[in-house]
């Protein structure tokens, strides 16, 4: 089984809010299309520092991140990011670390996407192929 990757558009959600309020021109909304690693072992969305900077994302607080090898590191957490993946959207905060964008469980759950390991791709939940359904209980 190989890794699963997906093209993702990340947009500064604060910019979008300012645009909706007519305080920012649509051309000034910061967004970035990136090739991301989909990692079902990761809980959170992860973006490298360079991506956070290009999107103009503030880091209002920190969290302790634990790596697969058991190491822990305090990392910045961004304000909201709009994530567009496989035709679906959600907002999430991101941990700032590493050198690539990682799509973790929170984004997968909120977009109701499943990992097709054989096809090495993301697919909509077969129970909800037309739109995401988020479990609340």
Image: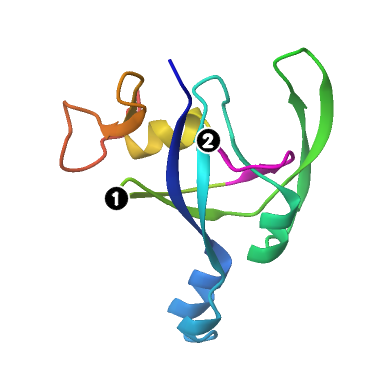
Which residue in the structure is indicated by mark 2?
37
Q: Nearer the viewer, residue 127 or 67?
A: 67
Residue at image x 54%, y 84%? Answer: 24
Range of magenta residues: 93-103
Magenta stretch contains residue 56: no
Residue 32 is situated, as x and y percent measured from the top left of the image, at: 54, 62
Determine which quarter of the picture holds residue 114.
top left
Residue 35 badge: none
Identify the element where label 1 is drawn. loop
Residue 28 is situated, as x and y percent measured from the top left of the image, at: 55, 81
Magenta stretch contains residue 102: yes
Residue at image x 49%, y 83%? Answer: 27
Q: Nearer the viewer, residue 38 or 17?
A: 38
Residue at image x 74%, y 40%? Answer: 97
Mark 2 or 1 closer to N-term? 2
Rendered position, 99 above or below 41: below
Identify the element where label 2 is drawn. strand
Image-based side of 104 in relation to 50, left or right = left
Residue at image x 48%, y 28%? Answer: 105
Q: Residue furthest front?
A: 2
Residue 15 is situated, as x and y percent measured from the top left of the image, at: 55, 72
Image-based side of 54 in relation to 62, left or right = left
Asked if marks 2 and 1 touch (Cβ < 8 Å), the reply is no
Rendered position, 53 above or below 113: below
Residue 38 is situated, as x and y percent measured from the top left of the image, at: 48, 32
Rendered position, 27 above or below 111: below
Q: Nearer the viewer, mark 2 or mark 1?
A: 2
Quadrant in which the N terminus is drawn: top left
Residue 87 badge: 1
Marks 2/1: CA–CA distance: 17 Å
Quadrant in which the C terminus is drawn: top left
């Amino acid at each position: 089984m190989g890794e699963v990757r997906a093209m993702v558009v990340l947009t500064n959600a604060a910019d979008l809010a300012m645009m909706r309020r007519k305080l920012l021109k649509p051309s000034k909304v910061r967004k970035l299309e990136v090739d991301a690693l989909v990692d079902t072992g990761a809980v959170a969305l992860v973006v490298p520092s360079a991506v956070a900077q290009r999107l103009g994302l503030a880091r209002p607080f920190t969290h302790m991140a634990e790596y697969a090898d058991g190491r822990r590191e305090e990392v910045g957490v961004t304000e909201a990011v709009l994530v567009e993946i496989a035709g679906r959207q959600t907002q999430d905060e991101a941990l700032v670390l590493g050198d690539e964008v990682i799509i973790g469980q929170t984004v997968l759950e909120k977009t109701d996407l499943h990992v097709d390991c054989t096809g090495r791709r993301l697919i909509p939940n077969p129970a909800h192929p037309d739109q995401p359904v988020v479990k609340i209980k």
